[in-house]
Every structure is written in C-alpha cells, then in structure tokens.
Image (cartoon, grey):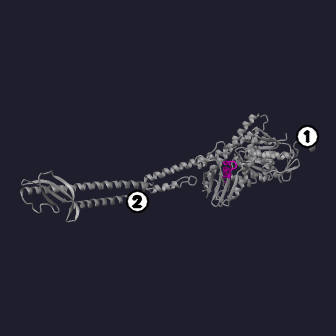
Amino acid sequence: MKLLTQIFRYQLLASLVVLLLGTGLFYISVRYLMDQEVNRELASSQVKVSWQLRNIERLPVYILQLGDSLQLDPVVFPGRALLREKSMFSYAENAVQPYRQLIFYERVEDQWYRVTISKLLLQRQQLRDAVVMTITFIVALLLISLLILNGWLSERIWRPFYRTLGSLDRYRLEQRPVLEFEDEKTLEFNQLNLSVKQLTERVAATYKNLKEFTGNAAHEIQTPLAVIISKIEELFQDETLTESQLVALSEISEAANRLSRLNQALLLLTKIENRQFPPGSEFVNFLPIVNRKLKDLEDLIDQIQLRITSRMEPAGPMIHPGLAEILVNNLLTNAIRHNIENGEISVLLQAGKLQVSNTGRPVNGNPELLFERFRKESTQSASLGLGLALAKTICDVNGISLTYEVENNRHNLTMTW
Amino acid sequence: MHIFEKTTCPVNPVAVLIKPMKLLLIEDERSLADSIQNYFQRENFICEWADDYESALEKINLYRYDCVLVDIMLPDGDGLDAIRELKKRSPETGIIIISAKNSLDDRITGLNLGSDDYLTKPFHLSELNARVQAVIRRRNFQGNQRIVFGKINIEPQEHTVLANEQEVVLTRKEYDLLIYLIANKNRVLTKESIAEHLWGDDADMMDNFDFIYTHIKNLRKKLLEKGAPDYLKSIYGVGYKFSEQ
C-alpha cells in the first residue's frame, strides 16, 4: 500500500471515529438538556394544577402551556406519580405524535382524581435533530477539508522522497555507480539523500574492487595452473612410474583441468556481467549458429541416440556474436547433457523467440533455480554447474528473457527478445 | 652420409633428413618455461628461452627461429610489441601467442599482427606441440609437408592418409586424432588433452571419455585393416600412447 494511502486511511479512520463519537455525545447531551427542560415544565405545570385544584374549584382554561393537554379522571384510590413517554393520536395533526405525560393523583373534596398532563414533544425533537444534524454536517465538512488538505500537503512534502525512491529504483551499478541528489528543503530528506549517496559510493567502491580482484585472481590463477598441468604432463612421460602412481597422477590432472575450466567459466561470467561484450548494431542470425553447433555436438547426440527435430527460420536478437555462440552452445549442450537415452530435442526458432526443449528427468522444485551458479540436479555429472548461469547472465545483460519450465518431463528453455 | 644414417636408423627416416627446428620461448614464468623447454628438447627441437621483453628482442635480432612462442603479458613490455618487431625482422617465422588472458580483443589483435595461433593458459604441452608442428608445417611451403610415421603417410594439404601404401578413409575427427597422435608420438597422452584437442570447449560437456574411445577404436580398426602395425597403446587409467615400439 502506498505511504500516502496509508496515512490517508488512518486519518479517515480517526475522523470517522471522532465524527461518530462526537455526534453521539452531542446527541445524548442535547437530548438530556431537552429532557430536563420538559421535565421542569411538567413539574411546574403539576404545581400549578395541584394548587388550582386545591384552592379553586374550577381550572382556568389557559393554565397550561400551548399544545399541552390536561385530563382529569376520577379514581377510587390514588396511585404513584408517573412520568412516561407515549405516542398518541392527535386529531389536530391527524397523526400519531410523541408526548410526554406526567400522571399524578390529587384529592378534591374527598374524591381522588388522576391528573394526566401530556406535553407534545414533536417540535423539540425536530429542533434537536436539526441541531445535531447541522453540527454533524459542519464537523464532517471540517474533517473532509482537513483530509484533503493533509493529502495534498503530504504529497507535496513527500515528493523528494518519491524522487529518491525513483532514482534508487532505476539504480544500475554498472552504468551510473554513484547517485547524486539536489538539495531539498526538508532536513530529513537531505539526510536520506546523503545516506543513499554515501551508500552507493561504498557499493561502487566495493564493486570495483571485487571486479578487479576477480579479474586479477582469475588471471593470476591461470599461470600456476599452466605450471601444474605442464608438470603433470612431464611426469606422465616418466616410464618408471607404477600403475597406481599413474592413476593418482591422472586424477590430479583431471582435477587441475576441471579447476582450469571452472576458472575460465567464472572469468567469462565476470566479463559478461561487467558488460565487456557490448551488443553490435546488427541482429545476429541464430539459424547458422544452431546448425553448426548441432553438427559440432553430433558425437554426443549420437552417443545417447537423440532425435533432433527443428523448425527454424532466420531470426535473432541484437547481441555480441561471441555471446550468441556461447548462448546457443550452452542451451544445446544443456539439452543433451540432461537428456535421456533415445530422447528428443526440439529446436524452435522464429522471430523474437528461440526455444530448446528436451526430454529429461523430472526436476525437484522450481526449475528456474537451475539458473543459479553451481546449482546441479545430479552430483555425479562432470558439469561445472555454470552453463545455465552463463546463459541467464548473457540474456539478462542483453535484455532477453530466458525462462525454464518443465511439463510432463519435457524441459523447455525459452528465450524471447 | 644419408645412406649410412638411414641404415642405422630405420625408425624415422624423415626426422633424420630434417635439420632440428629452432624455437624461441618468450615467457616470464620460469617453471612453465622449463617444462616447455624439456618437452621440445625431447622432440629434438632447439628451444631457447627469453624471460623478458629486452632479452627477447635481443634474441629476435640476433637469430632466426622457425617458430616463436610469445607470452603477451611480460613484466617489462607488451608481447604484442615483440611480435611487431619479429614480423619486421623475419616475416617467415611462425608465431604462437600463449596468454593467460582469454580475451577476444587480444586474440584478434594478435592474429591481425600476423601470429599463427593463440593458445590460452593453461594448456596441455601436447596441444602446444601439435600446434607448433602445424604452424611449422604450414610455413614450410617449399619443403616437404608430408607427415610420415612408420607405415603411415599423410598429405596434410590433401587430407589423404596412406597406411601400408593403401588409402585409409577417415572421418574428420579420426583424421584430427591421428595427426595429434603422431605429433605427440612416443608420449603418454591423457584423455582430457585428446578430448580438448578434438572438441575444444565442448570437452567440458564430457561426463566420461567414451567418445574418445569410440574414435580411437575406429581409427585403430581402420589402420589395422590396411595392414599397418598396431601403434596405439592404451595406458591404464591415463590415456594412450602412439609409438612404434
């Protein structure tokens, strides 16, 4: 959720709570005040009526307030005084209307009367509702305008933050290693920008060091490896060696060769990541590359008797020709290496797409994990575990998408550009 | 003189007729240089060594070589400059660059300067040997380019192989394999070096070396069919050896 939306949400929630609570409290207090008023009036009417009944035989016509009504009913025994609310039919209005009644008992000349004073509440209730509504409306208006103002202000104030976020989002270590920002009015954002700048500076320095180190290390390793391999070869020529010594030597040789290949693959990977192979200005046609590679790999294909089907038309992305070779090679060798005997490989090349799909064993987990370096499905193979990592890196730096999916034991590697 | 030598040395008549090849190795890593020198001395090559740019220039200016092996990363100068100098002095000399840098740019620059081959460190000495021999053969336009080993005769330009005077039809890989075996005759060759020679970078793909075995088996069968002796010995756990003994 967006920061501003979140702030807005909380503000809205708080406003609603304030509005509801405020309205409720206001309503209750207004009602309480009005009730008190009505009760007071009823009480004063009671005093007046009692006094009149006791001292004057007849009641004057206008003893009560306008709209109130008085009812005298003779009763045998007095009851308790009672204050109640009651809806009654008013002939004047021809509708049922709310009244508050005060019922009490008075004795006049040995006869008990039940006196009922009814007071129409309608106007008061209407007034009360009108007051509450008006106040609520004003408060709601106030809150809404506050919310809008807040939203607008937040957006203005947070703008530098979004600028920083945007440049972090577009941040590419290889292209523009250090981020620079303009001065902001807000202290905190200036601090943030400064921190980000320092962070990118450190990252850039580390990256540069690492790059140099990897390059140098790989180069420096090549020469000692050359010495090791050449010395092993010299030793092989020694005819006094026993068979077990020869076997041990052979294993050393194998390990040294593997190390050398590993080193070269890592070196290549580093170079590709450092973008030392810029794409040319022309599209590379994959068709002849695929055909040539299939011919080169004939031995391996024949050995496990794979059937190759291909549907190809000239197509290819803009890419360094050397990388195109490596890419095609890695995809095809991967399809051969992880195939099964009497399996199948199909190659589909069309505008914007190259798909190599092969039969194979099922993969545990997400097949895209095989793009990680040194990720291997089986441990017994001589594979370095770098082939697909290389292919992925090449695709990434050239803006090509490479996906790996497995369905029904068919592995599909698809490049789209 | 020739007749005398031929009778006393029936093993390899051609080798006797050819004067020893002269190589110059420009390489700053001493122990690697030692190995390379030893290897070529056993091939009856004269292999001189220069360990820096200065002494390399001195040797280039003083002597003529059949082939020069240059490490282009020298402590006191660029090996590419040495190649330029060499091309001025003696354009007929073969040049092989050996470099720890597997850089496409260097490779192209080197080949454009007129070097014949580019080999990335680390390499198999047998591979270096095969390449040196190929360069010398290619440069030796006037002379005899034929490769002779026992009863096998190869005309590299026509890609024809005769065993016991009869033509043997070989596939491309079998032919390459035979040339490689003869170039490194009397030596133990590891399976990896053969695989790398035949398949290059694709050798990474090999989970086992059955492929080599298939080609070796076919080559041996074809040669035996034409009546050539069995020159190929397999060395348990290591690889193969091609020799007349």
What chain does mark 1 sit on?
B
Residue A284 sits in which quadrant? bottom right
C-alpha separation, residue under disc 1 versus residue under disc 2: 105 Å
What chain does mark 2 sit on?
A
Tell which of A256 and B1 is nearer to you.
A256
Magenta residue check for A116 = no
Callout 2 secondary element? helix
The three-letter amino acid code for the residue at tag 2 is: Trp
Callout 1 secondary element? helix
The answer to whether residue A129 is above or below residue A228 is below
Residue A368 appears in the rendering:
yes
- Span of residues in magenta: A328-344
* Relative image position of residue A97 (x, y in whole percent): 22, 61
Magenta residue check for A339 = yes
Q: Are marks 1 and 2 on the same chain?
A: no
Residue B108 appears in the rendering:
no
Counting other residues with Cα less than 10 Å from the Cα at mark 1, is it few (<14), some (14-19), or many (20 or more)?
few
Tell which of A217 and A315 is nearer to you.
A315
* Relative image position of residue B11 (x, y in whole percent): 88, 42
The three-letter amino acid code for the residue at tag 1 is: Thr
> Which numbered marker is on residue B55?
none
Q: Name the residue under label 2.
A: A152
Q: Residue at x 49, y 54 (%)?
A: A165
